[in-house]
C-alpha cells in the first residue's frame, strides 16, 4: 500500500501590488502630515557608552529610552544627567523636547554620555534655529561649568600586552 503524502500549505507572502502606468503608488499619495518641527540630532560619548539626543520644539519633556528622565536611579546620577538643564534654567530649555537613547558602557559612563548629548543638542538647536548670540551665551555657560559637557573625553582603555597581567604591569622577575 502506498501512502499518500499530504501537501502542507505554506504561508505565502502577500504579493506586492503591481503598478500600471498611470496608477499612483501608495507612497506617492499626498498624506495629511503635521507641520515639520525643527529638530537636531547629536551624540555624546564616554568610554564605550554612546548616547543619542533628538532635540525638537515642544513642552520641555525629556525622555530616556522612552521613559521620563525623572525615573533615573540612583538619585546622584539623575542630578548628573539633569545638570545641563538645571544650569541653563527653564527659560532656555522649557520649549524643547529631548528624546535620548543610550547604549554600551556602564552606569556612570552612560550618564556622562547622556549629559554630553543633552548639552550638545541644546547648543546645536540654538545654533540652527535661534540666533548666534544666544547660542554663544549657552555654550559659554556650559563650558565655564564643566568642559566635558561639550567636549568628549578621548581616554580609552589600553589593550593588554604579552609578558604581564595587564597593559603596563609586568610579571615579577626571578633569577632562580
Image (cartoon, helix red, strand yellow):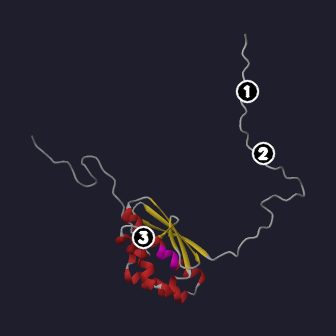
Tag on residue 7? 1
Q: Position of residue 162 (x, y in %)?
A: 28, 46
Q: Nearer the viewer, mark 1 or mark 3?
A: 1
Q: Which residue is mark 3?
A: 152
Q: Secondary structure at mark 2?
A: loop
Magenta-drawn stretch, dominant element (helix, strand or loop): helix
Q: Nearer the viewer, mark 2 or mark 1?
A: 1
**Label 3: how many Cα within 10 Å (few below 14, some 14–19, many 20+):** some
Q: Answer whether residue 2 is magenta in the image.
A: no
Who is closer to the viewer here, 32 or 137? 32
Residue range in magenta is 118-122
* Residue 40 position (above or below residue 29): below
Residue at 38 percent of width and 82 percent of height: 145
The mark nearer the N terminus, 2 or 1, is 1
Q: Which residue is mark 2?
A: 15
Q: Residue furthest top?
A: 1
Amino acid at each position: 500500500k502506498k501512502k499518500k503524502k499530504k501537501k502542507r500549505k505554506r504561508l505565502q507572502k502577500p504579493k506586492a501590488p503591481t503598478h500600471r502606468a498611470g496608477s499612483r503608488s501608495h507612497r506617492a499619495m499626498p498624506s495629511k502630515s503635521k507641520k515639520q518641527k525643527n529638530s537636531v540630532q547629536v551624540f555624546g560619548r564616554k568610554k564605550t557608552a554612546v548616547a543619542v539626543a533628538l532635540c525638537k520644539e515642544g513642552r520641555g519633556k525629556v525622555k530616556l529610552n522612552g521613559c521620563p528622565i525623572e525615573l533615573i536611579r540612583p538619585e546622584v546620577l539623575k542630578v548628573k544627567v539633569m545638570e545641563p538643564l538645571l544650569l541653563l534654567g527653564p527659560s532656555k530649555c522649557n520649549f524643547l523636547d529631548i528624546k535620548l537613547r543610550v547604549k554600551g558602557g556602564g552606569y556612570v559612563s552612560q550618564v556622562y554620555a547622556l549629559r554630553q548629548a543633552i548639552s550638545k543638542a541644546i547648543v546645536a538647536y540654538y545654533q540652527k534655529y535661534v540666533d548666534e548670540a544666544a547660542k554663544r551665551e549657552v555654550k559659554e555657560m556650559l563650558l565655564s561649568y564643566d568642559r566635558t559637557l561639550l567636549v568628549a573625553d578621548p581616554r580609552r582603555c589600553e589593550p593588554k600586552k604579552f609578558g604581564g597581567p595587564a597593559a603596563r604591569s609586568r610579571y615579577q622577575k626571578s633569577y632562580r
